[in-house]
Image: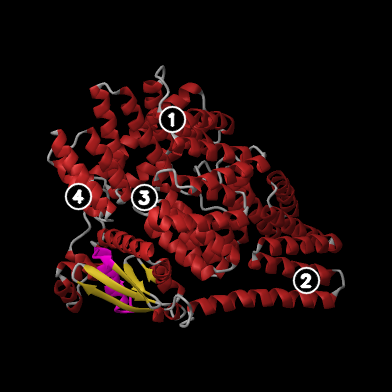
């Protein structure tokens, strides 16, 4: 295309994206591409805009095409940089390591012998994470240092990512104090705002992942709050959803299970357009939250969904089986998880590390004691103590101490059990985990009773019950606090005035340019507590509401309005097939090298993608159709509403926070002031 025409399209697209009109920017570039007007420069912008708009497959394909075009033009460095960008998106959002290795190999071949550039720095940073998530800590450290060395000369963002990787690898190697100091140093430097939004978000997210994987919850909470403040106005792609998962974990620990569940559900919705296997991460957190709340059916539903997404659902599923009374199945499940550990590349708990085993061991102690296997429980408690000692984490130490206390009590050593339970109470209290503290106090009461101290046992049991009652009371207040700072009564006006909207909250007025998401919000706020189907919201915008209501009044399913098209569109299917070819190539290389671990990991990835394709394509080769147009509408409406809330939050952070807390998205959307939440059953809350 002509340089002038290309500059015009890119400029208009960038202006639209800056206004928050990501769909407009995306459509402009997609149209230019369809008309044959997009060259490498336009495709690179398309890759950036598509990622921000939630079109992951388009983003990756755009960078693949940039790579091919630059190769053809003889621009070796640009081709290598595009290959690294493909690898980075595959690593961040698909968690498929075999294709990542393939694209990094292409980049490495192009970069070898070239003068050091930004592409070299990013190559090293992505390679460091690929090695870490494959379990090769030693090689990962070498690549992290390389990213720091090269990035410090030519690319501060790649340098920062390399420093975070080095800090995480120091921790995994047991050099915890040094790793934590480096993490804090990188985090403080990132706050200065010198990096681009994507790199800033990656630093924040990796920093919090490291701290939560290490169970350093105080530090994790501080950085999660910093990430939340930043992400309200700056996050792109999957970063805002990832921030929600981190927040949900902290809320669960602090005893705010209802709010944690809302955050986890919102995270699932926001991450769905981006992540593939890693959708199992928020689903697993949702399962842990529901298990904590006693919603066993809901917990099982979440863990099974995580398993179907290709994620490791343990120890959650084993604990669900225990809660259901199937001790034998729980014991078999947790033993299998420990004997054949998952190769899923989790950023919080990388494979082949002691941190990955810690939650499994903690669950095993509880399950084996229920099964009457003292020897296995004792062995798990021994290993858990070694893990806690190595990583110098108070929460890990608290979990290990509680596990040891339970084993001692089961062995009949009431005195030693009492000492360990008392220490566990102290540690969990200092961590700020009321549920775990209450469990430790209940165990202490049992140990005191076994030792003949009945009066003290009664005191501890009462204290434990009071803690749990306070947690439940705080949940009730959160659900029904009409006079709270962010109550529905604080939002008194939501009115359109031409091309602008006026919002009055707590006496403050905010004026915003019209957005589709704000129009959706206005409809939800006009019906507080009422669930509206996404098709109703879309139909009201397009003038087709009468048609939707006509189908309902005739008793016909909304699915009759038309399906959502193929479960995977042509672009997605082609992308899956390219990934499968890359995985097959990686398997052949692994066999040639005799690398059994690499081959096993790639085999798992091949099976996952094959299942995804077979689910979308029938035996005859015909596309299977999605059940309803609501899926397409759900994605579009969720994206538009969350963008609108982010824009509102830029102008009034308190109003943005209020809407984040009270607007639920999904197939059914609703504005749910806190007083409406308590009246809904767990199943109803899950549906929204």
| Marked residue nearer the N-terminal end (1 or 2) | 1
- Quarter of the figure with the N terminus: top left
> Considering the numbered disc 1 on the image, is that residue within a helix, a strand or a loop?
helix
Q: Separation of disc 3 and disc 4 at Cα?
A: 17 Å
What's the residue at 27%, 47% (across, down)?
A: 617
The residue that label 3 is drawn on is 237
The residue that label 1 is drawn on is 154
Relative horizontal placement of residue 216, taking residue 588 as reference (left or right): right
The residue that label 4 is drawn on is 27
Q: Can residue 430 be seen here?
A: yes
Q: Which residues are magenta?
A: 512-533
The percent coordinates of residue 575 (x first, y second) are 29, 39
The residue that label 2 is drawn on is 445
Give 316 or 67, whichever is nearer the viewer: 67
Relative horizontal placement of residue 57, taking residue 675 as reference (left or right): left
Q: Separation of disc 2 and disc 4 at Cα?
A: 64 Å
The percent coordinates of residue 113 (x first, y second) are 41, 16
Give 390 or 280, whichever is nearer the viewer: 390
| Marked residue nearer the N-terminal end (4 or 1) | 4
Callout 3–callout 2 Cβ contact below 8 Å: no
């Amino acid at each position: 295309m002509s340089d002038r025409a290309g500059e015009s399209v890119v400029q208009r697209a960038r202006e639209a994206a800056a206004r928050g009109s990501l769909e407009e920017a995306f459509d402009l570039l997609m149209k230019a591409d369809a008309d044959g007007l997009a060259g490498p420069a336009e495709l690179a912008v398309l890759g950036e805009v598509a990622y921000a708009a939630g079109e992951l497959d388009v983003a990756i394909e755009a960078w693949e095409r940039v790579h091919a075009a630059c190769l053809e033009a003889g621009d070796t460095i640009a081709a290598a940089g595009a290959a690294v960008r493909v690898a980075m998106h595959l690593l961040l959002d698909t968690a498929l390591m075999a294709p990542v290795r393939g694209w990094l190999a292409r980049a490495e071949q192009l970069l070898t012998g070239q003068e050091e550039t930004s592409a070299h720095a990013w190559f090293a940073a992505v390679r460091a994470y690929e090695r870490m998530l494959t379990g090769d800590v030693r090689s990962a450290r070498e690549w992290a240092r390389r990213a720091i060395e090269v990035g410090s000369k030519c690319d501060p963002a790649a340098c920062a990512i390399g420093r975070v990787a080095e800090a995480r690898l120091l921790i995994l190697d047991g050099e915890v104090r040094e790793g934590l100091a480096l993490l804090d140093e990188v985090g403080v430097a990132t706050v200065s705002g010198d990096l681009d939004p994507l790199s800033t978000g990656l630093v924040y997210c990796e920093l919090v992942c490291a701290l939560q994987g290490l169970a350093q919850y105080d530090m994790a909470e501080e950085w999660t709050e910093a990430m939340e403040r930043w992400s309200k106005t700056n996050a792109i792609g999957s970063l805002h959803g990832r921030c929600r998962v981190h927040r949900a974990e902290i809320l669960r620990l602090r005893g705010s299970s209802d709010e944690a569940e809302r955050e986890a559900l919102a995270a699932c919705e926001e991450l769905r357009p981006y992540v593939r296997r890693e959708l199992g991460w928020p689903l697993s957190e949702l399962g842990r939250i529901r298990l904590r709340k006693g919603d066993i059916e809901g917990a099982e539903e979440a863990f099974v969904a995580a398993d179907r997404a290709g994620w490791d659902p343990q120890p959650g599923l084993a604990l669900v089986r225990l809660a259901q009374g199937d001790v034998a199945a729980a014991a078999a499940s947790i033993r299998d998880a420990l004997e054949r550990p998952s190769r899923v590349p989790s950023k919080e708990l990388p494979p082949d590390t002691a941190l990955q085993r810690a939650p499994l061991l903690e669950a095993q102690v509880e399950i084996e004691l229920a099964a009457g296997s003292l020897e296995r429980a004792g062995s798990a408690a021994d290993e858990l103590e070694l893990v806690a000692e190595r990583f110098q984490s108070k929460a890990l130490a608290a979990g290990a101490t509680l596990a040891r206390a339970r084993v001692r009590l089961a062995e009949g050593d009431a005195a030693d059990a009492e000492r360990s339970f008392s220490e566990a109470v102290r540690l969990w209290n200092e961590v700020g985990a009321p549920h775990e503290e209450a469990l430790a106090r209940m165990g202490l009461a049992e140990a005191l009773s076994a030792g003949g101290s009945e009066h003290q046992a009664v005191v501890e049991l009462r204290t434990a019950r009071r803690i749990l009652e306070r947690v439940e009371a705080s949940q009730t207040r959160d659900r029904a606090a009409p006079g709270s700072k962010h109550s529905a009564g604080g939002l008194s006006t939501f009115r359109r005035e031409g091309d602008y909207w006026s919002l009055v909250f707590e006496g403050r007025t905010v004026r915003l340019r019209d957005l589709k998401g704000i129009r959706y919000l206005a409809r939800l706020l006009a019906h507080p507590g009422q669930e509206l189907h996404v098709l109703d919201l879309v139909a009201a915008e397009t003038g087709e509401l009468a048609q939707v209501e006509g189908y309902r009044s005739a008793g016909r399913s909304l699915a009759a309005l038309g399906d959502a098209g193929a479960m995977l569109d042509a672009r997605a299917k082609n992308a899956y097939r390219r990934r499968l070819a890359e995985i097959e190539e990686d398997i052949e290389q692994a066999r040639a090298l005799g690398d059994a671990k690499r081959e096993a990991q790639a085999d798992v990835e091949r099976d996952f993608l094959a299942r995804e394709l077979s689910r979308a394509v029938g035996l005859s080769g015909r596309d299977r159709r999605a059940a309803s147009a609501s899926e397409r509408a759900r994605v579009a409406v969720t994206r538009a509403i969350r963008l609108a809330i982010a824009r509102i939050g830029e102008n009034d952070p308190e109003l943005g926070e209020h809407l984040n807390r009270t607007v639920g998205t999904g197939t059914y959307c609703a504005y749910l002031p806190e007083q409406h939440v308590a009246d809904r059953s767990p199943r109803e809350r899950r549906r929204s």
